[in-house]
Image: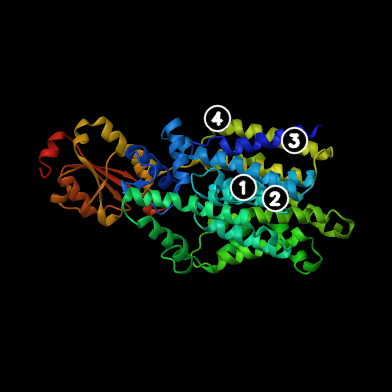
Amino acid sequence: MPKRLYLFLFFFLLFLTLFYNLGERPLFGVEGRWAEAAREMSLTHSIFVPTINFSPHVTKPLIPFLLIKASCDLFGENEFAVRLPSAIVALLTVISFYYLARKLFEERYRWLAVFVFSSTIGFVEFARLAQSEIYQLFGVVTALAFYVNYRDKASFIGYAGFFFGLLSGALSKGLTAPTVLLTTVAIDLYLNKRFYHFNLKLFITLVLSLLLYFLPYYLTAKALNSPLPFYLWFKENLKQAVDPYDNLRPFYIYFFYYPLWVAPFSLILIFCFATYFPKFKRLASDERWLLLSNLAVFLIFTLAKARRGYYILPILPFAVLLIITFLRNIQSNSWIIISKLLENLYKVLAYLFILLLFISPLFIKLYRYELKLSLLILYLVLLLLSLFIILSFNRKELSFWHTFSLLSLSLLCLFYAGIQPIYSESTEKLTGEFVKGLKESLSYLKERKVCYLKDKGDPVANVYFYAKITEKVEPVMLTKEDLKACGIVIVRKELLPDERRLLKSLGYQIREFIDKKEKSKSYFVAYVQSSDTLNTPSR
């Protein structure tokens, strides 16, 4: 069969993985920060000062906020619109990765690199989240693609493309992308004596890039009439790396997250390290560069004192490229034992993937969930595609590693585009929508404020997004005087019996949204029962 058929199959799977049920899952974790800040940008008509609960939220760079705002302006304020920019950026990342791999590998292995990259947990996990990680990954991959394609000559286009990627990453997440890129590029410059890149073209591009980088911070500072954005830039980027105020995870967490984001190809990476380090001097130039880059990036994140699992995601393209060099090398006769061993191990894993794909509806029924139509459609499509992939492998029309990558992507698609979004629940969404419904259905509440109990902690941004607040939710204490202006009171985590009795004595009715797993996600909404209650809250 023609090669185009398998490329079509891959991109069809990729589109399913990125876009199917994209708006089904309630906002998760910090997604609400990006979503709510972008929503409030439209309300305040400010594109340089994101706010959450109408207080400035300028600790994060602007690019994700602006893209999410544009998407919501086009498609409405919903989960699909919030995540759509991430999915599109993820698709662009795959395209950029192809242009990166095209320069390093012959055709068979460049497409294998793309297949492997797209079927890792690290890529798929963040491609469907409205967070800055996938934007940063796009910047890193794009900058690398321009560097590798233009590294053999001094080119203004090459420098401009490299700094475009670097700026995309820096203005999406922070200084992580520049740190990773400048470190890994410096390794290649040193190993291959590419010092001709230190020239006037590079200097001019660097200066222009620095001006563009700090321009949004200047515009935000001007809009606030305060130097706060520059202070927060220092605090969130430089100070956080050496003297963090949060995210104090143990140094060894990346020994878990590094292989997790590369999974299911982590075992190949282990074989690669075990084989490459003893033979370092005999490795090809790019193999040495990629090996040292993986080591350097890992050490940078490990030595930094602020640590979270997803911080190390920029290592993913370097890990995948290193894996592909290894898979290419073991095809030679001198590596035949390692090649057969790896293939046999991954054949077992492939059979497990097929089994999991086949019996997944049974697991859903076992947990007493209803089999939704959208999941059944996806399941049948993926099952048929997987059978076709296996048949193509048996006919020797697909190599084993291409086959395994497509099976991996199919299983990830089933989970991330099917099971996870369809069966996810959120007390934050229920709480926010309930508050919104109260404001819309009970006219007397429109005259009163929405408040939250200060000593219980403020609601997360996800709640604000679903509540569609149009003015600041005020913090109050649980006293008759403080509650006088409040028609709705949001209480987070817990509501003690004495607090419940006091609220009821003041004329409030209480609705509970309990999360049995995480106390911090439990909410209580107290609201006055009638317009008369507003006038005499102590009746």
Q: Three-letter amino acid code at disc 3?
A: Tyr
Going from the N terminus, do you reach mark 2 or mark 3 first? 3
User: Mark 3 touching mark 1, by CB under 8 A?
Assistant: no
For discs 1 and 4, the disc positioned in front in the rendered view: 1
Q: Is residue 188 above or below residue 364?
A: below
Mark before the other along the chain sequence, 4 or 3: 3
Q: Position of residue 29 (x, y in %)?
A: 44, 49
Graded by Cα atoms within 10 Å as few (under 14), some (14 to 19) or many (20 or more), the crowding at tag 3 reads: some
**Residue nearest the viewer, comparing 253 with 353:** 253
**Residue type at the position of mark 2:** Tyr
Label 1: how many Cα within 10 Å (few below 14, some 14–19, many 20+)? many
Give residue 161's mark.
1
Q: In this figure, which residue is indicated by the disc labeled 2?
A: 150
- Along the line of sight, the residue nearer the viewer: 405 or 135: 135
Q: Which residue is mark 3?
A: 6
- Outermost residue on the right side: it is 333
Mark 4 vs mark 2: in front: 2
Q: Secondary structure at mark 4?
A: helix
Percent x, y for residue 197? 67, 58
Instruction: Specify the amino acid type for callout 4.
Output: Leu
Q: Secondary structure at mark 2?
A: helix
